[in-house]
Amino acid sequence: MHNGTIYSKSLGSWSISWESSEDYRFWCLQEHPSNSRIVAIVMLNPGSLSGAGENLNQDTTLRVLRDFFEGTSFNPYVINLFNLATPKPHVLFEKWERRDHPSFSYQELPIARFSAVMYAYGNYENGDDYPTQIQERIAAVRDVLHGIPEIAVPRNQSGTPKHPLTAQQQGLNGVFREKIISYAEAIT
């Protein structure tokens, strides 16, 4: 799709596939056999999973998403505002000039396959590091995905959508699952 290499691995009952090129990850689809539809999850940047997947087990955010989505009828398809894979956001900001791979395009995502979109990029647009560029990217991604119904997730005090790790730290896993399940029930 984006001139990267597509990889696939199994982890428990989940099949995980992604497209990478060097230090970049363009997308990641986690599929469970009990789920049949896809929700696009928009976050800041890829974490530990890139390349051939040596660090798949270390990607905490992907593990949290598997917990949120198991048994909901939806599989999470993770895309990011920026596709440089770094386990910590501050590393993305330190390497800001490398934040995007030149061959990546949001228009090449399988948008027609998305039953819904869930924004979960956290509060970085209100931080000290590149807030204007982050706000501009959020607007651009929302524009590309504008026709897809949104599953609203819990919000930070600033009104931005909570990141899955923040939700887990705050004990909101059940709230995220309820939002996904309620949406699934509403469209069936």
Image (spheres, rainbow, N blue to C red):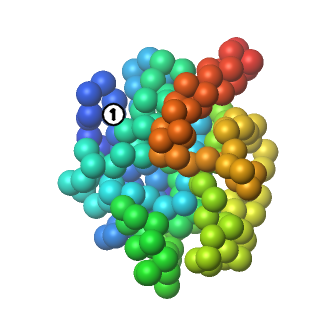
Query: Where the C terminus falls, by quadrant?
Result: top right
Left or right relative to 98: residue 44: right
Return the residue nearer the eye: 76 or 155.
155
Name the residue located 38 percent from the left edge and 50 percent from the top edge. Answer: 18
- Indicate the quadrant where residue 32 lies: top left
Return the residue nearer the eye: 101 or 163.
163
Name the residue located 61 percent from the left edge and 47 percent from the top edge. Answer: 162
Can see residue 6? no
The kind of secondary structure element at disc 1 is strand
From the top left corner, tell me how far across and down residue 81 is, in percent: 58, 63
Residue type for callout 1: Ser
**How crowded is the residue under tag 1: few (<14 C-alpha within 10 Å), some, or many (20+)?**
some
Name the residue located 67 percent from the left edge and 74 percent from the top edge. Answer: 131
Residue 30 against residue 45 in the figure, above or below: above
Left or right relative to 42: residue 99: left
Return the residue nearer the eye: 104 or 174.
174
From the top left corner, tell me how far across and down residue 43 is, in percent: 56, 54
User: In the rendered picture of this protein, how many numbered marks are placed on residues?
Assistant: 1
As drawn, the residue found furthest toward the bottom would be 97
Return the residue nearer the eye: 36 or 42.
42
Name the residue located 54 percent from the left edge and 21 percent from the top edge. Answer: 73
From the top left corner, tell me how far across and down residue 178 is, in percent: 62, 23
From the top left corner, tell me how far across and down residue 134 is, in percent: 65, 70
Residue behind mark 1: 15
Residue 76 against residue 32 in the figure, above or below: below
